[in-house]
Image: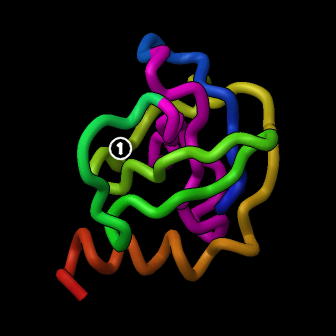
Amino acid sequence: MQYYVYKNTGRIAAYPYLLDVQSDIIGKRNTRVVIPLFPLKNYKGPRADRLTPLVTVEGEEYVVMTHELASIPHRVLGEEVCKLNHQREVVKASMDFLFDGI
């Protein structure tokens, strides 16, 4: 579901969560477009706020790694953790910045 955060069951442990950004109108497919979430406490160096905004998941801050957007097999999405509908505009703005520089 769009703007839901799921546990990452894939091989890249550095990204414990995946944010689903694919429109639900697309329907059930074998893949979903997601943005990995990276723990802020592990983030090194400067962060581009518009490209990599912060979100809170289970009481911890995570960096939305918009530039790492990917299509993944649906089976990689683990347990649903939370919804980030309330941060939809921030996430969409980061994708606008990635694709259009605005």
The residue at the point 69 percent across, 46 percent down is: 5
Q: Is residue 36 left or right of residue 68?
A: right
Q: Is residue 41 above or below residue 67?
A: above
Residue extending farthest bottom: 102
Residue farthest toward the left in the current orientation of the protein? 101
Q: What is the basis of the colouring in this image?
A: rainbow
* Range shown magenta: 13-41
Image point 48% across, 76% down: which residue? 92
Q: Secondary structure at mark 1?
A: strand
State the quadrant of the C terminus.
Answer: bottom left
The verdict on residue 17 being magenta is yes
Report which quarter residue 94 is drawn in.
bottom left
Mark 1, other Cα within 10 Å: few <14 / some 14–19 / many ≥20: some
* Along the viewing direction, whichever of 82 and 70 lies nearer the viewer: 82
Q: Nearer the viewer, residue 31 or 41?
A: 41
Q: Residue at x 78, y 57 (%)?
A: 83
Tell me the quarter of the image containing the N terminus: bottom right
Residue 102 on the magenta segment? no
| Residue under pointer 1 | 70
Percent of width and height locating residue 15? 49, 28
Farthest top residue?
A: 11
* Callout 1 amino acid: Ala
25 relative position to 13: left or right: right
Q: Residue at x 66, y 65 (%)?
A: 24
Q: Position of residue 49 (x, y in %)?
A: 37, 67
